Image (cartoon, rainbow, N blue to C red):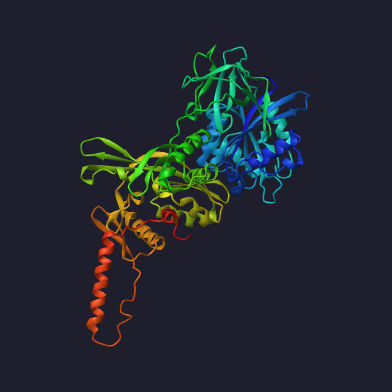
Amino acid sequence: MQQIRNFSIIAHIDHGKSTLADRLIQATIMVPERLRRDQMLDTMDLERERGITIKSNTITLPYVAADGQEYALNLIDTPGHVDFSYEVSRALASCEGVLLLVDASQGVEAQTLANLYLALEHDLAIIPVINKIDLPQADIPGTKEQIRRELGLDPESAVLCSAKEGIGITEVLEAIVRRIPPPRGSPEEPLRALIFDAQYDSFRGTVVSLRLFDGEVRPGDVIRLMSTRATYKVEEVGLFGLSRQPAARLRAGQVGYLIAGIKQVSDTRIGDTITLDARPAAAPLPGFKEVKPVVFASIYPVSNDDYPALADALEKYKLNDASLVYQKDSSAALGQGFRCGFLGLLHLEIVQERLAREFGQSLIMTVPGVRYEFTLTDGTTLAVDNPQHYPDPVKIKETREPYIRASIIIPERYVGAVMKLCLERRGVNPHFINPSPGRVELRYDLPLAEVIIDFYDKLKSVTQGYGSFDYELIGYRPSDLVKLDILLNGEKVDALSMIVHRERAREWAVRVCERLKEEIPRQQFKIAIQGAIGGKVIARETISAFRKDVTAKCYGGDVTRKRKLLERQKEGKKRLKMVGSVTIPQSAFVAVLKTKNE
């Protein structure tokens, strides 16, 4: 165990985690030329296209240190985006230390600080690493000063490197060996292993990623999952290389995988403890904090016949992304579906994209919303995340919505534009902090509902990509909330209903009606699209009917002949409107989510 080091790389998004991971792999493993590529630990096409890490991946690196000893370095690569912080916390539960990466040109940013606090909560050894020192705009003394002032770490202990150019990689590896402690635990104790990830293999069942804290496990052992008490016989154990590498056994301190023919996806729970059935551990390991979703949306299959396939896909997806929360839901317009909870809007996008790509699901997604609280006249408190469950307005005494404290770090020249954006989104209590010359940190209390649709996109636009955004939930505050219904020819479309602030209701209603007018095809009869609060219509658009020129054959003669034909047509249209139904195309639901300037 003295020769094992378990570590993770944490940083703000775009500070170079994946590139540093690539260099560490190339410095320790002879990667064949045909397998060499950028972002080696990013296995999804989606990660490579967007240039972000979504899933934390693990690899074991063999390294001969300067003292001649051979070490096994278990690297768990993590995402940087705030929406995937749950993924980071799971990776940190399996480590003894972290490399805290700071970009020499950007300095300490919001997520750098958030990830540092996560690492401190787990009591991990922290090695600051200053990356991108080769850039012309790199400010190494300034970055060291920020590390001292904002992170409270010793700037002289920071390792300087450039992952892109391969500078300082040996120093990083030596620092890992010298400054990260070996794992604690005993191979003689009863087996205790923490499941920190899993994925479904259609041929071999669930492949479990685990960190062993005590004991050992071999093929042939009968294991027990402590939360479900299900037992399985181990078929294969091994380590993570560029591909899975089977081993004779896994011992305390190691990170590896286990295959035991687990076909029931629901049996495997991320954060569960594995022990031996014959010699069980006295108590399970502490799992992970319960995930708290902040954005809610319903997803429905395009065809109702695909509902069982969607249910199966979500169960398998949940195994690979434990931060997704879902329950059954139904809608008059869209049939059977699921109400899902996400950690943010990027998380929502990624889930939608992965379900389409990896499981071949065609989905319709409703407008994202948040969870509101209602105090009723009888004193009860109701939590509502679905507009369909909005209580009777007569019984509502007080309405509250969730607020976040947003931390926005920007260059000084964008302060005016960002303040204007925050005020438009009902931001209050602004605070200014100057972390370093030329940079400003703005702190605003904002309603979460105003942030989830397109706030981050707008922020990136007004700051020309320089703005960094992080947030934390700070609880519920009283607010004037109403339910906005969208009606087509007088009939409510429940999938397009939303709970909004009264001041923003008219703006939302106009926007949705305009979008639907563009997307819904014309019919033989007029279609009225209305936005209403209760019985009061606050916005309207009309899709005009196709008009056949019934007066074409009338030439000459009295005008009453034309009028007679037009009246007859009018009667026909009225009858058609009563029996005709309007089908909303899938693109209309997507269009409602888009911002005005797209």
Identify the residue at image location x=34%, y=73%: 548
The quarter holding residue 131 reads: top right
Outermost residue to the bottom: 556
Please, is residue 302 above or below residue 284 in the view?
below
- Looking at the rendering, in which quadrant would you find the N terminus? top right
Number of numbered discs visible in the structure rendering: 0
Q: Is residue 535 left or right of residue 334?
A: left
The quarter holding residue 200 reads: top right
The answer to whether any part of residue 119 appears in the image is no
**Where's residue 423, x and y in %?**
41, 53
The answer to whether any part of residue 169 appears in the image is yes
Q: Depth check: 587 or 103 in front? A: 587
Please, is residue 28 above or below residue 369 in the view?
above
Q: Is residue 60 left or right of residue 342?
A: right
**Where's residue 495, x and y in %?**
36, 49
Q: Depth check: 31 or 18 in front? A: 31
Outermost residue to the front: 553
**Where's residue 367, x and y in %?**
40, 49
**Where's residue 449, x and y in %?**
39, 47
Q: Is residue 64 left or right of residue 93?
A: right
